[in-house]
Amino acid sequence: MELIHKNKENCKFAFLGFNRIVLKNNELMDNIRKNGVQVPIIVVRGSELEHDVELFDAVSNQKVVTEEERNNSLVVLDGQHRVSCWLSINNEDENQEHNLDIPVIIKSIEEVGNINEFIVSINNTSKKWKGADYIDNAFKQCKEDEIVKAIYAFKNLGFSLSSISRYMCLNKDYLNPCSLSDYVNQGVKINRIDYKRAVKIYLFLLKCGFSNNYLKSRYLIDYIMEQKKQDDLDIALNKIYYISDIKSVCSLKDGNEIEKLVDKDYKNVMEKNKKEVLAGENIHRLNEISDEEVDLFIRKHIENQKKIATKYRRVKSNEKSEKQVKKEEIDKITDKVEMTHCKMKVVE
C-alpha cells in the first residue's frame, strides 16, 4: 500500500462497472472547492485486474477497452463521488483556477482480495451504502440469478430492502445487506426466501386493487405475515380477496386496524354468500398466477431500469460535448446580435 498525491495531469481514474452509479452532489462539490479532498480515495492499478472486470473512464464514462487504457488506469474502489467532484472542479474552468491535488491510497490486488467483498465491506462499515446500493451491486454481479433479478425488480418499483425481505421471506430481517452479500459472494442461502411466491403475492394484491405505492410500504404485508403465523397464507389472502373497500384499507397504517376491517368485510360476505366463500377457501390464490406472469414482471422491471441506466450513461458521456455545443450556440447568437447592431448603425 502506498499513499500518494495526484493531480489531473498525471492520473487517469476508472470506475468499476458493477459499482454504484455516481450521482451529482453539490454539497460535496462546495466542500471540496473550499477544503480540497480530505479523505484519500482507495484504488487498485488496472493492470492488476482480470480482463473480464468491466471498467469505465471516470471522465468520459465510456467503457475502457484497450490494454493500454486499462494498464494506465487507477481503478477506484472507494471514493467515486469524491473523484467525480474533484474532476468536475478541475475541469470547470479552462484557466485552471482550481487545480487541486487528490490523496490516493494504492492497494495491491493481494491486499484487496475479492474486489466486490472489499467494496461491500468498506461501505457496510462506514454506513455509506443504502439498501438500494447493495441490491444494485448484487445485480451487477449476478445478472442471471433469478432471486437477485426479482429483488432488483422490486427495488426498481421503489421497495426498500426491508420491504422486499417481507415479501421474499415473509420476515423483515432475513434479507439484509449482509445476507445478500453472502449470497452473492459465497453462495450462502438466504433463509426462507421464495422469489416466485413474493412476486405472486404482489401481483395478487395488485389484482385485488391495491396500488404499488401502498404495497411498497410495510403495512399490508406485515398484516399478511402476522396472519400466516396464526393460520395459513391462503386463508389470509382469501380474506383480502373479499375486501370491499380497498381505499379504506389503504388509509390504515396499523395492523390491528387492518385486521378489524378485513375481518368485518369477510364476515359480511360470509353472511351474504356463505357457500361461495367456503368454496373459495379451497382455492390457492397464488396458483391462479402463472410462472409466466412472474417472469414477465421481473423482465419488465429490469428492462425499464436498464433503459434508464443507459440513458444516464449517454447523458454523462455527452456532457462535455453538450457544453461545447451550448458555447457555440451562444457564440452564434452573440455574432448575430453584433451583426444586427452593425446594420442598425449603418441605417442610422
Image (cartoon, helix red, strand yellow):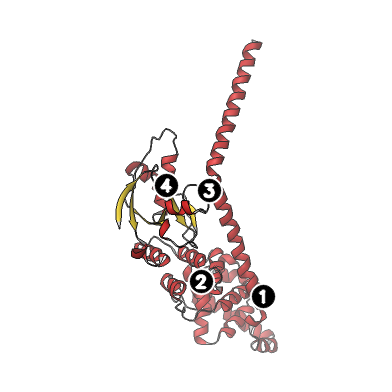
> What x and y, as percent, mark residue 37?
34, 47
Task: Point out the frontmost of discs 2 and 1.
Answer: 1
In the rendered image, residue 112, in percent from the top left (x then y), is placed at: 36, 64
Is any atom of residue 293 visible in this view?
yes
As measured in the structure, the alpha-carbon distance from the residue carrying label 4 to the one carrying label 3 is 13 Å
Give the residue type at disc 4: Cys
Mark 4 or mark 1: whose residue is earlier in sequence: 4
210 lies left or right of 230:
right
Disc on res. 292? 1
Amino acid type for the residue under numbered disc 1: Glu
Q: Earlier in the sequence, mark 2 or mark 1?
A: 2
- Residue 328 shown left or right of residue 28 in the figure: right
**Mark on residue 316?**
3
SS for callout 3: helix
User: How far apart are labels 3 and 2 at the CA level?
Assistant: 31 Å
Split into 4 quadrants, where in the image is the C terminus? Answer: top right
**Image point (39%, 47%), residue name:** 11
Identity, as a three-letter code, of the amino acid under mark 3 = Lys
Residue at image position (57%, 31%) is 330
What residue would you read off at disc 2?
A: 164
Question: For the residues carrying marks 2 and 4, which lies nearer the camera in this image?
Answer: 4
